[in-house]
Structure formats: structure tokens, C-alpha cells
Image (tube, rainbow, N blue to C red):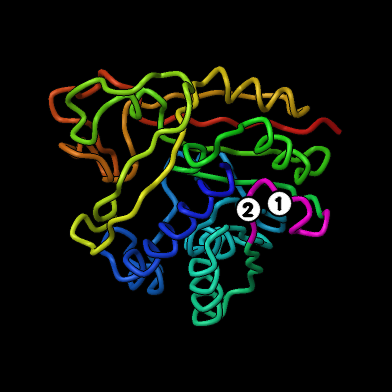
Amino acid sequence: MEDVFFSANRALWDARTAAHLPSGFYDVAGFRAGAESLREIELAEVGDVAGKTLLHLQCHFGQDTLAWARRGATVTGLDFSGEAISAARALAAEMGLAAEFVEANVYDAPLAVGGRQFDVVFTSYGVLGWLPDLGRWATAAAACVRPGGFLYLAEFHPVVWMFDNDLRALTYSYFNTGVIDEQTAGTYADRDAPIRQDEYSWNHPLGDVLNALTGAGLVVEFLHEFDFSPWNCFARTVEVGPNRFQIQGLEGKLPLTYSIRAFRPS
């Protein structure tokens, strides 16, 4: 069944790529003109990447990958969507930025990058929920981290995924109780986009994420939780600061994002 899930989700992200490229949410035109796509959380916690190698897992159409390239990293982006990878390569060429983009399932990342290891393995925002097996993800990601390097994850908090789409009712378990089968209408970047497809996702509590990383041989340096989302991608949001969004009526009461940095011992 896993192949069925990935095939359906790949088709969904192929369709989303076409809707996301012209969307105001991603503001590709602004990015081309020099606007920053990375957010305060990852900028503060990843740090200076100049002169470092960076692998961006589940990179979508590569905008953040290229943002790290503009900051001096030698970048490789990986995603399972062929449409997204094609768009990423086109965007890099258009902007004159050196970047490699690889089409592959994240579970196959070590093989897809030819066994190379990187100073930084980066992945962010809406990535883990598409994966049924965090152990396989962590093992693959850790294999791509060079000794002394680190994996960095910025992600939406699992508490968010307990709610319905309007963030009014607790609907789903905090724990991974199996696949969640839903039909998508539109997309977080364009709710009116003509997309209606099945999607398959899984909830992963923080304990499972941490245990997967340590089980893969990484040493967790920190776990931080935040009461805001740096992206306006949920229902009923209010902006409480620049690129800081909270849920109306629940301001300051919910963790909306978290971050983890874990290094591979030398």
C-alpha cells in the first residue's frame, strides 16, 4: 500500500507545483528580485552556511534551496515530485544560481545523492506528515550528514494536526494511529486552485521524531517549540508580528511549530 500512498501524494504535489509557482504565498517574483524566502526560525538556528555543503530534503520547487545558495552554500535539493524538480532547475537557471536538484523519494536520499555526505541536511515545514515511517526517514537523512555536520528540521507542531481544517475541533489523534485519507480541495497557497485529489498523511508525535533521530545515530542538540507559524497557511490566523501567525482566539496558547538540530558525532 505504501507505493499507492506515495503515488497519490506525488500526483498531488505535481499538481500543487503548477498552482504554487504563480501564487502570492510563495511570491516567486519577489524572490527573484531579492526577497528572502527563509524565515526567522531557520535563519537563526542553522546559522552561517557560507562555504558549506547543504542538502535540502523534500525541497518542493527549490525556492528555499536557492535561498541557501544565495547565502553561500553549495546546495543540492531533493524531492519526489518530477514537476517540482523541473521547476526548481528552471528557477535556478533563470536566476543564475548553482544548484543540483534530484528527483527521488526521501527514503532513497543516500543512493540518490551518490552516497555523498553534507555539512547540513535541511528540511522544513510540512514534510514529516507525508511519511509513514519516521525510522526510515531518519536513517536516510542521517546517512547524508557528514561526521561533525548536522540535520536541521523546522516543522509544524503535531498538536496542529489534531484539529480539523478550520482549527475549531479536535478531530485526529496526536499519535500515529495509521494513515489519514482525505480529499484535498485547493491548496494552502491558493485555496481556489482547481485541485481535488486524494492525499495520505500520518501524524507523528514529538517523541517519535526524537526517537527516530537518536535511533539513527544522531545526537539531538536542541528541541525548540514556538507559539507561532512563520507561514500564513492555516485557517483563522492573525498576524501578531512580521511573519508570525497565530490562531484567532487561541493566541499564545498553542505550539504551532518546532525545530530540532541534531549532529552526527565526529
Vertical placement of 139 versus 96: above or below?
above
Query: Quadrant location of the C terminus?
Result: top right
Q: CA distance from mark 2 to mark 1?
A: 7 Å
Given residues 117 and 199, the one toward you in this image is 199
Q: Is residue 28 left or right of residue 177?
A: left
Residue 3 location (% of width, % of height): 58, 48
Q: Is residue 258 left or right of residue 137?
A: left
Report the label total.
Answer: 2
| Residue found 60% across the figure and 51% down from its top | 57
The residue at which mark 1 appears reads as: 109
Residue 200 location (% of width, % of height): 43, 42
| Residue found 61% across the figure and 32% down from its top | 134
| Residue found 14% across the figure and 30% down from its top | 248
Tell which residue pokes out farthest to the front in this image: 1
Given residues 174 and 74, the one toward you in this image is 174
Which span of residues is magenta-colored? 104-115
The residue at which mark 2 appears reads as: 105
Contact, mark 2 vs mark 1 (Cβ under 8 Å): yes
